[in-house]
Image (tube, rainbow, N blue to C red):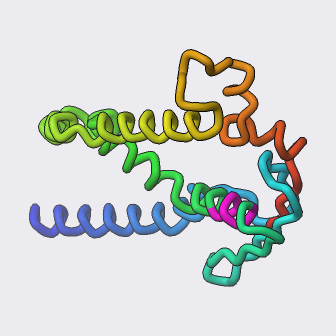
Amino acid sequence: MKWTRRIFAIIISLIVCVLILIFCLPFLNDFKHEGQLQIPGLSDKVTIQRDINGMAYIHAQNLDDVLMAQGFVTAQDRLFQMQLTRLVVQGRICELAGPNAKKFDIRMRTIGLYRMAKKQAAINAKAFLSHKLGDDPEKWQWGKIHTLELVNPIRRNGPGKSVYVG
């Protein structure tokens, strides 16, 4: 009798979990499916269309706008994955998984992927600034650094252009 109740409780619990997943998962990724959005950094009209399976098709006039729209679509589709990857690399997965993940966080911080990425980003930024402003950092002026294309694309392109999602 006890086994029958336990099996029945497990079956009911599984059915409830499946129903919750079926009815709640579609609402977790609640991005805008159609309409217009203003996205800073676009130089022309971009159209993003999705087929019945959710596959995005991007139509733009130039490569920069295609890449910007691709980043936008990727963030719409995989924001949780991107956040989870960031937490794993930084050794902060305990924030989601609790104290059971402490050993994993210690291992990831020991490996130092985040430190290496920050160091590489600094090297790349210095190389970019050297290319734009010259090799002597003492002569760099904040006004020049602030208005570079990479740092301030809004000033380069003007107010955000429309992104059509349809």
Q: Is residue 164 left or right of residue 138?
A: right
The residue under the point 69% across, 58% down is: 68
Image height of 32 relative to 61, above or below:
above
Image height of 80 relative to 125, above or below:
below
Q: In x, y percent, where is residue 116?
A: 30, 39
The residue under the point 83% across, 60% down is: 163
Count of residue discs = 0
Frontmost residue, 75 versus 3: 75
The residue under the point 75% across, 65% down is: 33
Q: Is residue 51 left or right of residue 1?
A: right
Image height of 135 relative to 73, above or below:
above
Q: Which residues are magenta?
A: 65-70
Q: Is residue 20 left or right of residue 165?
A: left
Q: In x, y percent, where is residue 90?
A: 32, 37
Q: Is residue 27 visible?
A: no
State which quadrant residue 8 falls in: bottom left
Q: Is residue 94 left or right of residue 62?
A: left
Image height of 55 relative to 162, above or below:
below
**Does residue 68 belong to the magenta stretch?**
yes
**Dominant SS type (magenta):** helix
The residue under the point 54% across, 22% down is: 137
Q: Quadrant of the N terminus?
A: bottom left
Q: In x, y percent, where is residue 58?
A: 73, 73
Frontmost residue, 144 versus 77: 144
> Which residue in the rendered view is the most extreme toward the bottom?
52
**Does residue 48 belong to the magenta stretch?**
no
